[in-house]
Each structure stands twice: as C-alpha cells, then as structure tokens.
Image (tube, rainbow, N blue to C red):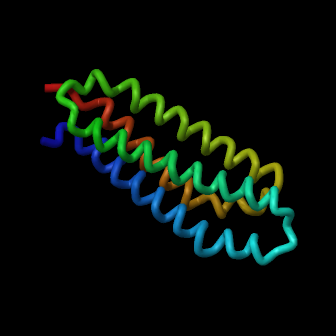
Amino acid sequence: MVRNYFYLTAGLLFVFLATTHTWFGLETALPILHGSNIDISTITVFTFQLHMIGVQDLIYGATAILMAFQKRMEMVKFTALVIIAIMLARWVVMAFVTIVHNAGGLTDLLTSSIAFLVLIILLFLGTRVEGK
C-alpha cells in the first residue's frame, strides 16, 4: 500500500528522467561526438558521465519508490533530504559551469531546472507526510 504519493511520484519522475536522459544521449549526443574529431578519451569520459547521471537518477527513482511504501515515514526523511541536497548540488554545478563556459546558454537549463525543482518540491513535501 502506498504511504507517500509524493515519493511515489518523484520516483516515477526520476525513472522517466533517467530513461529520457540516457535515450537522448544515445540517440543524439553520442553520434555527434563519434562523428567528430574529438579525442577518444574525451568521448569516453563524456559517455560514462552520461551513463552515470542516468544510473544515478534510476537509483534515486527506485529509492523514492521504495520509500513511498514505508510505514514509518520518519525513517526515510533523511534519505529524501540527502537526495534533495545532491540534486541542489548537481543543479548548482550545472548552472556554474554553464555561466562560466556559455552564459548565453543559461536558457538551455530551463527544462532541467524545472524538472529539478519539481523533484525537490515533491521530495520535500514527502518529508512533511506523517507516518501512520
């Protein structure tokens, strides 16, 4: 029985984001890199970074889904707060790197920023649910 729909929704959204992130990378970004003159070491680093983010989001999704079924919500609040902290740190890094290397590209972060904000809000609201 679902005890926390905020965590369930966040978990499903994380799984969706992991899938679309990886799919987009495989279908668009990696073919462009492989067709370029970029060094193979750089392509390798980009490829594992792409997959690490997808796997990380998949793990967050599975964790949040499992958290949604826990009876004692106080036991999973810390996990939600850690995921929130990591998501905020990830967004700060994305924004900082974009500002430093391509300030005009900040608008490209809009979709990711909205997704991060929705996930953070869902996880935070999930911490507000009292255990039964």
Which quadrant: the N terminus?
A: top left
Locate residue 16 relative to residue 21 in the image: left or right: left
Residue at the farthest bottom position: 35
Of residues 35 and 57, which is closer to you in this image?
Answer: 35
| 84 is higher (above) or lower (below) than 44 | above
Which quadrant: the C terminus?
A: top left
Place of residue 97 in the rendered image (x, y in percent of width and height, measured from the top left): 76, 48
Locate residue 15 relative to residue 89 in the image: left or right: left
| Residue lying at 28% horizontally and 39% vertically, measured from the top left | 66
Place of residue 101 in the rendered image (x, y in percent of width and height, measured from the top left): 82, 54
| 72 is higher (above) or lower (below) than 48 | above
| Residue lying at 47% horizontally and 56% vertically, measured from the top left | 18
| Residue lying at 32% horizontally and 27% vertically, measured from the top left | 76
Locate residue 58 relative to residue 95 in the image: left or right: left
Place of residue 116 in the rendered image (x, y in percent of width and height, measured from the top left): 50, 49
Place of residue 117 in the rendered image (x, y in percent of width and height, measured from the top left): 48, 47
Of residues 106 and 19, which is closer to you in this image?
Answer: 19
Of residues 122 and 43, which is closer to you in this image?
Answer: 43
Residue 124: quarter of image? top left
| Residue lying at 53% horizontally and 61% vertically, measured from the top left | 21
| 4 is higher (above) or lower (below) than 33 | above
Q: How many marks?
A: 0
